[in-house]
Image: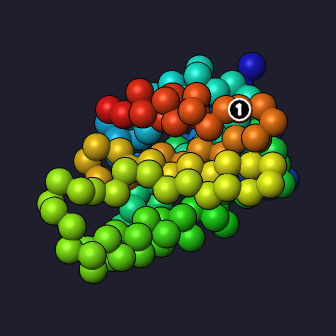
Amino acid sequence: MQLPFLNRLQGLTGPVVNKIVSSGGAAGPERLTAERILQHVLAGLPELVAAAVVQVESSQALATYTTAREFNLSKVLGHNAEVIRQQRLALAALRLPAEEQLEEVLITLQTQLHLLRLLPDGRRFLYVVVDCRDTNLGIAREVMRTCED
């Protein structure tokens, strides 16, 4: 049963967990595409910690998912978008051939892997966080690669 009051109340206690949440600013088709991407990621990586589809230039999340209330995606997504922008500038400074484009950034921590994969349009990226003890890097990369729209 959907009770709007309870949904708003849950939002006051912190990020919504175990549910795909769409951004209010995302347009219809763009929002649906972002939700579909996250559903694909969840099907392939059911034990993930967090995931989001984010616009690179504006740092706006189109859709997010997290399993842990203490993992606040809104605080980290802008920084991750900046990582993508700065890495693009660094690659441009190398003057590589045009076909050499940034595809993925991997951030390895002791217990977590943070993967940022640009989607084919280059305007959005998929951000996925997995626990190293639960997920193999190769599997996570393959799931992310196969969900590109």
Compared to 136, does 73 lie above or below? Answer: below
Q: Is residue 130 left or right of residue 103?
A: right
Image location (x, y in percent) of residue 139: 58, 28
Image location (x, y in percent) of residue 71: 77, 54
Q: Which residue occupies the foreground of this view, 11 or 44?
A: 44
Q: Is residue 13 left or right of residue 55?
A: right
Q: Quadrant of the C terminus?
A: top left
Q: Is residue 122 left or right of residue 76?
A: left
**Which residue is the site of mark 1?**
135
Please tell me in which quadrant of the rendered image residue 119 appears: top left
Image location (x, y in percent) of residue 140: 58, 34
Report the number of discs. 1
Q: Looking at the picture, which amino acid does disc 1 mark?
A: Thr
Compared to 82, does 31 lie above or below? Answer: above
Residue 17 in view (yes/no): no
Q: How is the image coloured?
A: rainbow
Q: Residue furthest bottom?
A: 93
- Which residue is located at x 56 percent, y 54 percent? 106
- Which residue is located at x 36 percent, y 76 percent? 90
- Which residue is located at x 80 percent, y 54 percent? 110
- Which residue is located at x 67 percent, y 55 percent? 108
Residue 115 in view (yes/no): yes
Image location (x, y in percent) of residue 113: 67, 48
Q: Which residue occupies the foreground of this view, 10 or 136?
A: 136
Q: Which residue occupies the foreground of this view, 133 or 85?
A: 133
Compared to 129, does 55 lie above or below? Answer: below
